[in-house]
Image (cartoon, grey):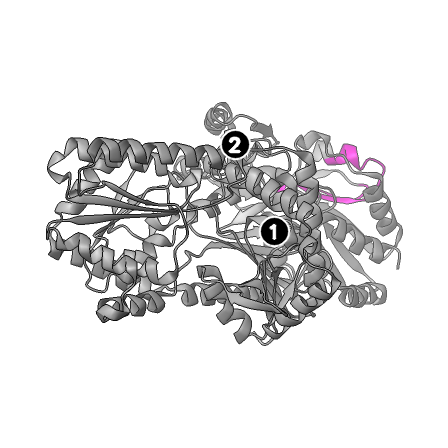
Amino acid sequence: MKNNIHILSNRLPYNVQKTENDFELIPSVGGLATGMKSIYTKYEGKWIGWPGLSTDQMDDTDQARVDKVLEKAGCVPVHLSEKEIEAYYEGFSNKTIWPLFHYFNEFVDYTHENWEAYVAVNQKFADVALQVLKPGDAIWVHDYQLLLVPQMIKSKMPEVNIGFFLHIPFPSFEVFRILPWRNELIEGMLGADLLGFHTYDYERHFFSSVRRLKGLEINFNQIHTKDRIIMADAFPMGIDYEKFELASQKVRHKLNSEKSELQIELEKYFLLSPNRKLILSIDRMDYTKGIPNRLRAFASFLEKYPQYRGLVTLVMLAVPSRGKVDQYQLLKKQVDELVGQINGKFGQVNYSPIWYFYRSMPFENLIELYSYSDVALITPVRDGMNLVAKEYVASRVNQNGVIILSEMAGVSKEMGEALIINPNNLNEIADAIHHAIAMPVNEQQQRMDVLQKRLKRYDVFKWAGEFINGLEKVRSIQHQFNAKKITSSLQQTLVQQYQNASKRAIFLDYDGTLAEFHHDPNAASPETEVLEIVQKLIEDQRNEVTIISGRDRETLQKWFKGYHLNFIVEHGVWTKVKGGEWKMLYQINADWKDFIRPTLETFVDRTPGSFIEEKNFSLVWHYRKSEPEQGIVRANELKDELTNLIANHNLEIMEGNKVIEVKSGGINKGAAAIRFIGEEQYDFIFAIGDDWTDEYMFRELPQDAVTVKVGLVNTAARYKVESVSAARALLKAMANS
């Protein structure tokens, strides 16, 4: 990818700090900052984000100085006021999206003013990005604070390649649908060309919401919109493995004079008894982390296994977080009380069961805790990934140590060698602590060896590189899909061919081509615009216009009564030349219907919203009004069941747009169209259709025919248009030429 790749996130990778005369940048130590620095510098992009100081804290001179300092570091600031930060970040981002996406519905704040601030600030981020972006560039947008930004950028610069990564869980549809602004958030995310999630579960939940809210088709991991292909995939985020590994090695080889106060205290702890064990708990003070449950489980462990009292200590580091929010204040109070109760109940003169730190720690001290702790206890009730688990593994240079890990953390999908627990099962956690402490060293090393090799391979740089490769891939896919797309210049060429022709055959599919799909197939009668287009095409004496459709003859004849048209209906069973009578191309019967109908009726009963449409020589099971995911599952089940039923009958199963149709075999639109043309010499053959039943027609017609697929999907057609409206526009251009 030769063009620049820019990064857009809520915060920049630096903390801006005011000095006596100027401002300086302090690098952030988080995983995102580490991984992204390599990307935006390698691809000569900019990092766009909030610098951490509000406009209320700076005058114009200060702001100019901050901008200058950031410019030298390749960063572009998005300046926010205290009011904007309060409503957009503390408000909607952390009081609405955060609790909802972590399944804490009872904490969700639905304040409309916060939503309006979220929209306005997202637009602010998008506007700054649009000033930086050039055609051909790519931009990688990060996390839940900026869900609307992709569409805001795409609407103004459609040629920009946009990636988006969600660093928290995406909830199931049943939870996501609660949000009043669910459609807006989905539309915002669909502005991206590539969407990344930590796990397949989150990706699956996102697809479910896209299907149910937007009704879009999803094939494998591709979302098909009217004008482009969007991809979504799972990219489990890694860490800077080497950084933690090297830092841990240094801790092990420090001289006494170089050791920190914490390291000295940790070594003293083990000097008192070689059988002592340290269990490490590191989290932000957040209700999603399951800290109270963890403390109760540790108390259960000491109660159930009294032989470990005085020998096992829980080191709990809780980093302050969102202290102004009521739920976080209550959580802090609850944790303080639990620590006090447990230390009071199980503590001894020279023994405190819990060492409790309510503060952040420097990187060096974190490495010391990772290096000296025998067990890492990581039990969130919901967590997007949890990099602490990976950091602990990277720091265990002696390959001993055990991880007790919640199945609700995204990282559990990669770390099957850990002791996986349900964070709400206190007895299970207590037993897992006992299992971890009693685990033989050789088993610890075997488990840790596998984990270390895996996590070392897929570090943060590999993660970032994989996502960038994904962006390149989706750009290539979109290019391939758009290669057949009818542009304005190509449309002019096709219209010119149409004008120059002396005898033309025009085949027009109906549903999904001339008309949008309708929940009730009997209510999809042609709009005035469609009738006007058809009439103009008919009026040209050089045109033979044919409606070619899977619909029944009675309906189409009624809808186009009085129009001098040819018809090929029911996928080629019946034909009617203008002014003539209906003729059956193939001698077939419908005796098989009574044999097949009970199976379709069973699926109607089992699939709310589905129904059967009966044609002369086919039966159609419609599931457009069903729950999207259930409809897809049932359609696959029905296809399997029908395949067995029709094994010894001359029948075919045809899958259209949200329909399964059973019809007599050997009949299709392609054979019918070729038969219709016969020996006539046409110098312009045009065919347009939207689903796979039209693919027969595209393949059977002569190679020089102008075949057009409605929808940006794989096709045998020579060209594509993205939608029904685009199909009408092309036909109108031909008719009016």
Residue 343 falls left or right of residue 54: left
Could you tell me residue 246's position as x and y percent? 30, 70
Residue 188 falls left or right of residue 61: left
Q: Name which quarter of the figure residue 182 lies in.
A: top right
Residue 675 shows in this picture: no
Could you tell me residue 643's position as x and y percent? 42, 39
Q: Is residue 571 magenta?
A: yes
Mark 2 is on which residue type?
Phe
Mark 1 is on which residue type?
Leu
Mark 2, other Cα within 10 Å: few <14 / some 14–19 / many ≥20: some
Q: Which residue is mark 1?
A: 146
Residue at image position (64%, 37%) is 181
For the C terminus, the image quarter is bottom right
Residue at image position (67%, 59%) is 78
Could you tell me residue 12's position as x and y percent? 57, 61
C-alpha separation, residue under disc 1 versus residue under disc 2: 21 Å
Q: Earlier in the sequence, mark 1 or mark 2?
A: 2
Q: Which residue is mark 2?
A: 107
Which stretch is magenta? 556-579
Q: How many marks?
A: 2
